[in-house]
Image (cartoon, rainbow, N blue to C red):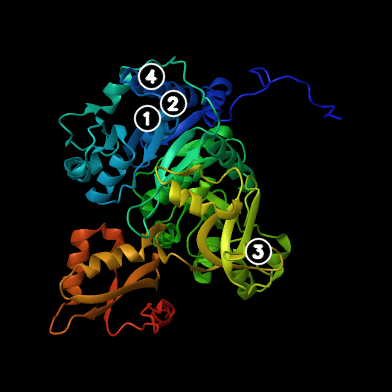
Amino acid sequence: MGNPYNTDLDRNPANYQPLTPITFLERAASVFPDYTAIIHGSIKRSYSEFYQRSCQLASALSKKGVNRGDTVSVILANTPAMLESHYGVPMCGAVLHSINTRLDAATIAYQIDHANTKVLIVDREFISAIRSALELSKVNPILIDYSDSEFPISDSLSEAVEYESFLSGGDSGFDWLMPEDEWDAISLNYTSGTTGNPKGVVSHHRGAYLLAQGNALIASINKHAVYLWTLPMFHCNGWCFPWTMSAIIGTHVCLRHVKPEPIWDALSDYKVTHLCGAPVVMSTILSLENSKRRLLENRVEFFTAAAPPPEKTLTEMNVSGFNVTHLYGLSETYGPAVVNEWHQEWNDLNKEKQASLKARQGVRYLPLESLDVVNPKTMKPVPHDGKTIGEVMFRGNVVMKGYLKNKKASEESFAGGWFHSGDLAVIHNDSYIQLKDRSKDIIISGGENISSIEIEEVLHKHPAVNAAAVVAMPHEKWGESPCAFIELNKNQKASEEELGQWCRDNMASFKLPRKFIFEAIPKTSTGKVQKFILRERVKN
């Protein structure tokens, strides 16, 4: 007997539309056209203006021949142009590729080549790196440069069209494109490569839609909340918050540079309710002396990821008017997919116990279907004993579509019907997970993922270096920073200053080891470096 609820009708436009976060902005502009969507210094734009400018961008890109599946790359600070790109680019069917503004020219060149970038939008602050990247690149994208009125720079790319001029050629009433399928790509974000080149994480409209709504529900974000941009939007598309804020008709407060006084000014002037960032943002906030801090009229929700913040930092944030919630996720999960859900009864525990609970990554996000800690060899869940280590694995609609042009890596990451994170953890009897190590030796410094292998490869190219091993070292401000153990070749010399300059010349500055230790590197009988010994050496 067949299913009695089968109507024998196919999906049709009346009862099925592909999910896309673009509709959040369209609805906000329709229902609250005059409500303030964006504040950036002296700039204040309504939802109607935000929507119209995004349509203009989509229209202008279409007129330049940008079609479905084309890549539009942007290297922008947290500005209105970056928010407009999160809507305008997918509105014309293209895929948004946000470039980390801290990357070196060679890495940028690799990314725009691999993504086959058709259009490149550049903030003038980063023109120097882009000029060098274009000299190394094999593609020849259409160039658009963005001049921020709040941070004017006269330097420009001679062959580029200025952003506002480009926008003026577009139609604010552009009939934008819905995705043909909600699984169509909406964005491309590159991981920090652990071996070889970084991988391009492809995200889809469905996942972005669901995580954007999940943010609002998990964070209990009320309608008309005010969000301060201290998290770079190039990080996993700002954890999908560019789309979340339209869903709740909130206000974006753009902040170009993360500095203590502008943060406190914005918190007070605009009555900010929410912000996100790595632990280093908390350190920045707390670095301003009390006499210079502005009065906060409301308690501020702060969402952090990366290494758990120290108990002292959590206490200082609480006293300063912030409630801190710990999140965890990856580029492959659109940003946060795990949250440390706090139980009210935990407020009665002593500070030591609270700190141990805060240090856990937590439980699955609302739009994530499954989260577990699994033995990667047997693919069976580990016991919920808080002791047995396994690999964190994800399953659900907020897991990436796959890696761009890398079928082998995609298949490996999805082996057994789970996404393999590469992170090692335990799971407690209440199903809260807690990270214990990173199987790929990624160092998380100030929210940036740094590959220890990448640094080691650079050091091994120095003529005086026989062997190098890089591990995470605790850092008061950044959470973690790279520490390099060095074995020199016989009869060779190299100082800490020399190797520091060598690294500076061959990689992005935020990846530089902050300490060099010259000694024999411990290895197993088969020659494998015993990094756990090195980690213990730099623990304190």
**Nearer-N-terminus badge (2/1):** 1
Q: Which mark is residue 380?
A: 3
Whether pointer 2 and pointer 1 mark residues with C-beta atoms closer than 8 Å, the reply is: yes
Crowding at dot 4, Cα within 10 Å, few <14 / some 14-19 / many 20+, comes out as many
Relative to 100, 346 lies left or right: right
Secondary structure at badge 3 equals strand
SS class, disc 4: helix
- What residue is disc 4 on? 59
Instruction: Tell me residue 399's x, y (percent).
Output: 55, 46
Cα distance between the residues tagged 4 and 2: 11 Å
User: How far is the residue under mark 1 from the one under mark 4?
Assistant: 14 Å
Query: Residue 70 — which label?
Result: 1
Q: Could you classify mark 2 by the number of other residues whose Cα lies within 10 Å: few (under 14), some (14-19), or many (20 or more)?
A: many
Give the mark, 4 or 2, whose residue is nearer the N terminus. Answer: 4
Marks 3/2 in contact by CB < 8 Å: the verdict is no
Q: Which amino acid type is shown beneath numbered disc 1? A: Asp
